[in-house]
Each structure stands twice: as C-alpha cells, then as structure tokens.
Image: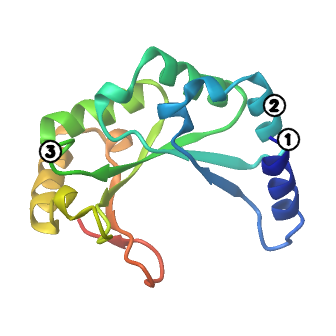
Amino acid sequence: PELLERTLTELRRLPSVEVLRIGTRAPVVLPMRVDGALVRLLTRFRPLWVNTQFNHPNEITPESMAACDALIRGGIPVSNQTVLLKGVNDSVDTLEKLFNGLQRILVRPYYLFECDSVRGAAHFRVGVRRGRALFRELRARLGGLALPQYVLDEPGAAGKMPLA
C-alpha cells in the first residue's frame, strides 16, 4: 500500500496527468486484496479508473463480484480488458456469457484483445480472422454497453489498433 500511495502521489504531481488508470487482475485472482483500506486509498486519487482482466465467465465469482462492487461503491469505475485465448474463451457463447456477466456486475467490457505475439503464448493465439468472425457474431448478440472494442496492442505501435 505504501508503494502504491507513493506512486499515485508522484503521478498526481504531473500536470499532464489528469486521470489515473490502474491495470490489475487483483479483483479476479486476489479479490480479498480489494478491501476497505485499498478502496479508501484509491478514492483519494480520483479521477482514477481500475481496468481489470476477466477472461472467462467462471472468473465472475461471489468474491470477484464483491471486490468489483467495493471499488464501484467507493466511486472507482471498473472496466475490463479480456484477452481472446484459444481453448479458454474462443467461442461466441463463452464471450457472450462473460460480457453480459460483466455488465450485470457494473464492470464495463472495454477491450477484447487479440493475444499478443509474445514468446510462450503462441498456443493461445486465436488469430485475427477467427477473432473478427467471433466479434461479428457478438455484435449481433450483445447490446452496445456489453460489447467491447476488439483491438490489437502491437508493441511499438501508437496505441490500440481496432480489428473490427
């Protein structure tokens, strides 16, 4: 907590930084870490967003829901960045269930990422062609608030590249 507080304090001192964003899987994999003390700490640095990473609907558990709810009740908006993973969530039914489930717990489905081209992850890559087909089907099934952007975060590129 002390390191996080020092880091956020230093970032807040930068005139060019207006909104802080924290990317973390804590609500998913370590939900008990999102306690009252952490929420109070984060609230002091608003405007601040938490971007988490639910990749499968089975990760929406009572504990992860409680962690997200604590953040939201503390005034911290929560978005989600899902990675499209072969054999994990590469079906339209799974993604639809995930994104609708996130919307139900007030977590905004923000990005659906094409899996990065990093060493050791090739077996998880779905590929853009298959990803686009999945996304077209999702677009027909989901309401606008539940539909994330399908993007590629290419190293060295200037931001996220839309894929659909």
Regarding mark 3 in the picture, which secondary structure is present there?
Answer: loop
Q: Quadrant of the N terminus?
A: top right
Percent of width and height locating residue 117 = 29, 72
Task: Tell which of 70 and 63 is nearer to you.
Answer: 63
Q: Which of the 4 image quadrants contains residue 13?
A: bottom right
Whole-percent x, y for residue 86 in the image = 16, 51
Cα–Cα span, label 2 and label 1: 7 Å
**Residue 59 to residue 91: above or below:** above
Circle 2 sits on which residue? Answer: 40
**Neighbour tally class for label 2: few under 14, some 14-19, many 20 plus, Cα within 10 Å:** few
Q: Which mark is residue 87?
A: 3
Q: Check if mark 2's residue and mark 1's residue have beta carbons within 8 Å.
A: yes
Residue at horizontal 34%, vertical 39%?
146
Q: Nearer the viewer, residue 10 or 15?
A: 10
Nearer to me, 132 or 88 = 88
Q: On the rendered structure, is 33 left or right of 58?
A: right
- Per the rendering, the mark at residue 44 is 1
